[in-house]
Amino acid sequence: MARNITPKEQDYSQWYLDVIKTAELADYAPVRGCMVIRPTGYSIWESIQKYFDEAFKETGHVNAYFPLLIPISFLEKEAEHVEGFAPECAVVTHAGGEELEEPLVIRPTSETVIGHMYSKWVQSWRDLPILINQWANVMRWEKRSRLFLRTSEFLWQEGHTAHATREEALEETLKMLEVYRTIMTEILALPVIAGEKSEGERFPGAENTFTCEAMMSDKKALQSGTSHFMGQNFAKAFEIQFQNQNLDLEYAWTTSWGVSTRLIGALIMTHSDNDGLILPPRVAPVKVVIMPISKDENKLNNSILPSAMELANRLNNVLGSRSVVVDTEFHMRPGDRFFSHLQRGVPLRLELGERDLEQGAVLAVRRDNREKMLLPISDVENSVPVILEQIHNDLYTRALNFRNDNTFQVSDFSEFKSILETNGGFIKAYFAGGVAEEKKIKEETGATVRCFPLEDTSTGKCFFTGKDNAKMAIFARSY
RNA sequence: CGGGGCGUAGCGCAGUCUGGUUAGCGCACCUGCUUUGGGAGCAGGGGGUCGAAGGUUCGAAUCCUUUCGCCCCGACCA
């Protein structure tokens, strides 16, 4: 295991990779741009999945599975969609030892196959809405990849819904955006700004794209979830038609929305420090580690270890099985054991030694701020969950404060540029430009419109074009 | 896909310019003893054929040609 993590200040990119490596979250695969998600990384993904999946079901969605391979002609049915995805598609041309009559694309996203199926399933207004989600892998051939943030293959969830009316589909789009925002806040401790994407950043084929944007600890933005309103674009391309109550034939209105394993990258870059991973308790595979400590082997085996086991059982009953573990790596010295849990981001460590046992207490050490507390053993069922809750809140607040401290509102371009140069971060400004203006700003500053935040509906004079009645936009350099 | 860098033990590197003993070093790993409340010490030990292919040569990690891969910086993207 790598022992030293490159400090963030020295090389952020290397720091990120070092954190992943020391926490054993992922490793490079033999194929370029692909990664192996190691057990620890995968259990974080399982935690994330659990919360999202539950929320999807609560909002009436059901899971299904659509195939990995998509006829290439499907992609070509929606003009913007093919233009957007064709360059990054991997294509299967041979199978069974023969060249295929029609090449098959490895799904970069599933709008097209799902559209095809929906057209078969939808006849009447009674067939709507269709509210389906799928957990799957997708492939987008990336020129430049980074673990979790951008790999050629990644895991995600894609919801695809079809509705009878524009209003209902739009409502669905925003509802799922809000589901994302809530889970990111309450489970991942990620402060995000929900907003609408600019024309230039829109999903290929969508009428409108909404996003949750987060600020990483290097002040760059990360798009951490998106929700698209497709209008009738895909319904027309795939003939998803239904007969309404007036006997008219109508095209359905569709949406799609997704979050991916990129969220793990967001967690790392939002919370972790120079000693390694820091995980918010709700997604931490191991929430609490109990470390029995003693140089006296007899005491260790006869009293400390059994006490630690009992403590773990009691806590597991409260926190959920297997989220509390006892560290029995006695071949390692305590210092090494401390650091290994530190690097893996275990939110809370309970040290149990002779001194503690004598006073009927454990020494609790928080991963996020290193705070040490002596907790009465009799009361851990109450005290530990409270501390974990506090850790979650503190992580969220710290990230939120960081974002606020690095968000600036400007009214002219020179100020825009100087802030971006000297500090970076999010820049709020009224903006009325189109794709051409966005491109110009990007070329000159590296920053793009991350979103038009939903929570700020004020209007003003555009900082770039001078036009009145411009919407509030957030700009940033991004991943 | 353009610019730069690099492939020698699990990781990090030296050796390559100026071919020549059994290819070294640090960390990690294994064994033993001593240690153990914040990254231990000593002793012993295992592991590589030098990214791959071809060529030059008595002899190649080292020279030549080709090729593959990775990392960093840019253009394109969840």
Image (spheres, rainbow, N blue to C red):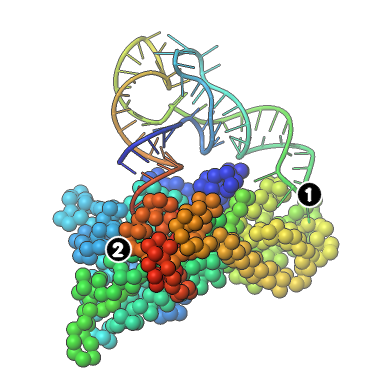
Position of A153 with respect to A190 (left or right) is: left
Image vertical order of residue A439 relative to residue A173, above or below: above
Q: Which residue is mark 2?
A: A204
Q: Position of residue A450 (x, y in %)?
A: 43, 62
Q: Which mark is residue A248?
A: none
Task: Tell which of A289 and A10 is nearer to you.
Answer: A10
Identified by mark 1, the residue type is Lys
Q: Image quadrant for the N terminus of chain A? A: top right
Q: Quadrant of residue A284?
A: bottom right
Q: Is residue A473 above or below residue B31?
A: below
Q: Chain of mark 1?
A: A
Q: Chain of mark 2?
A: A
Q: Which residue is pictured at 54% across the width and 51% down the height?
A: A422
Looking at the rendered structure, the kind of residue marked 2 is Pro
Q: Element under label 1?
A: loop
**Among the two numbered marks 1 and 2 on one chain, the one whose residue lies closer to the N terminus:** 2
**A9 lies left or right of A181:** right
For residue A156, which quarter of the picture? bottom left
Say whether marks 1 and 2 touch (CB < 8 Å): no
A142 left or right of A402 in image: left
Whether marks 1 and 2 lie on the same chain: yes
Question: Residue B18: percent from the left, percent from the top?
Answer: 45, 13
Viewer-closest of A368 and B47: A368
Q: Is residue A159 visible?
A: yes
Q: In the displayed structure, would residue A61 be above or below residue A28? A: below
Residues packed near mark 2 inside 10 Å, few (<14), some (14 to 19) or many (20 plus):
some
- Residue positioned most to the bottom: A246
Give me the residue at 30% from left, 53% from top: A88
Which one is closest to the eye, mark 1 or mark 2?
2
Percent coordinates x, y for residue A182 in the rendering: 51, 73
- Residue A38, visible in the rendered structure: no
Residue A295 has which mark?
1
